[in-house]
Amino acid sequence: MPVLNLRSDFTAAPDLTEQMQEIGHRARAAARKIAQASAQAKDVALRQVAECLRASREAILAENARDVAAAKASGQTQALIDRLTLDEGRLAAMADAVAKIGALPDPVGRQLAAFERPNGLLIERIAVPLGVVGVIFESRPNVTADAGALCLKAGNAAILRAGSDSHRTAMAIARAMREGLEAAGLPADAVQIVPTRDRAAVGAMLSGLDGCIDVIVPRGGRGLVERVQSEAKVPVFAHLDGICHVYVAAGADLDMARTLVINSKMRRTGICGAAETLLVDAAVAETHLAPLVTALIEAGCSVRGDEATQAVDARVTAATEIDWRTEYLDAIIAVKVVDGLDAAIAHIEANGSHHTDAIVTADAAEATRFLAEVDSAIVTHNASTQFADGGEFGFGAEIGIATGRMHARGPVGVEQLTTFKYRVHGRGQTRP
């Protein structure tokens, strides 16, 4: 099997601008071919990609060891190093995820709607690929495989820009993916990784590469997402913060509430679906507030609360206005007592980020109002906020969570990486 050297692909480019434009043009050409590939051809290619990832494990793990060593030497946090690190198990899971994406139903060519006009025209709305998707990500090298595979399944080409911390690992993963595509007879340029750490490459992608990029997906911290959202000349699928709430309503069962609050906050504190604020209805504060606060503290979570919350446990520190709008990504939660459902919804609207919000209640009317009136990408009833994940939605994987209101919202899986076009069938009709 030939080894593709991504670095040597661009050695002739005299500067970064020309290099990035060449990447864009090659992606556009590949996207046209991938868009016309059959479902079977894409599935075979993704299985081949998964096999190439497994076969390249020694090379990938060796490059990852170099990235991890550099991160440790530069004093990076243990949390970042953990996100960066691959081992045999994580690499196997990455390859398995690619194969599972291949086994998903093909999102391209689906008939989304069909209707007949009075003049006899038959009109169909059909799912088609977006085109070229640019993905800019930071320390998680598995994004290379997840994003590339999701884009391929949806008939798109992908331009990937890894963070400096994971650059060597991402290059090795992308090389294996390109080998798999070539072995399956599809264009290797459907997955390209920017072969430089130069931050100017991000700016070039945000410009759209002369119309070659159709959408940008950032995966990383607030600084990256803010830059992408402010500078991008093309549409963006992203969320800035995951300020997620759990509202324990008047009709909440205490045992269920305790289980869901602990899971929502503490299962994984560093993900965007982790709860950051707990709202407790005043109607059940006397019975529910103290047990919930105690459970959080005993689970290792620091609690910052309003006066009512501080009154039930001396270990609670005072919450400030900033706390209601903070994504901690840590074992910290803000807790507030609210006067009913209207107050809970108003608090979420004023302070939330439209990501994921939950209500705990046995009252169907309370749940119906909350689900209808809370304007977030994901709202849950009697379920943890940590279900905000493409895999948990049955999407196989996700390229990110989108909190905007245009096109994609919530987990962005293969269906969300398509758009649509209309096909109009006539019998010689003309417009009068």
Image: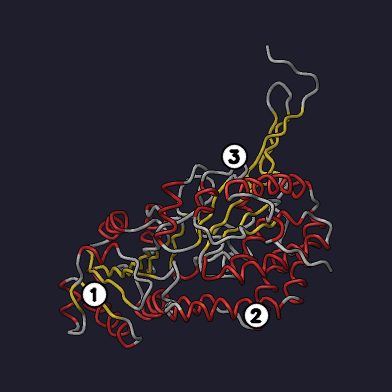
Which of the marked residues, 1 or 2, is nearer the chain's N terminus? 2
- The residue shown at (83%, 63%) is 183
Where, by quadrant of the figure, is residue 46 drawn?
Answer: bottom right
Read off the residue under disc 3: 210
Disc number placed over residue 62 in the picture, else none: 2
Label 2 CA crowd tier, 10 Å (few <14, some 14–19, many 20+): some
Mark 1: give few (<14), some (14-19) or many (20+) Cα within 10 Å.
many
Question: Label 3 sits on what residue type?
Answer: Asp
Return the residue nearer the eye: 169 or 281. 169
Q: Nearer the viewer, residue 84 or 259?
A: 84
| Placement of the N terminus among the 4 image quadrants | bottom right
Give left or right: position of 333 versus 268.
left
- Residue 171: x %, y % from top left: 64, 66
The furthest residue to the bottom: 298
Query: Which label is found at residue 304?
Result: 1
Numbered disc 3: secondary structure: loop
Residue drawn at 71 percent across, 54 percent down: 190
Instruction: Give the image location of residue 406, x and y in percent.
Output: 49, 45
Spatial separation of the CA atoms under disc 3 and disc 1: 49 Å
Q: Earlier in the sequence, mark 3 or mark 1?
A: 3
Q: Position of residue 55 (x, y in %)?
A: 77, 76
Instruction: Name the residue type under label 1.
Output: Arg
Residue 167 pos. (x, y %):
57, 68
Q: Inspect the image, locate mark 2, and give the three-letter code of the amino acid beneath it.
A: Ala
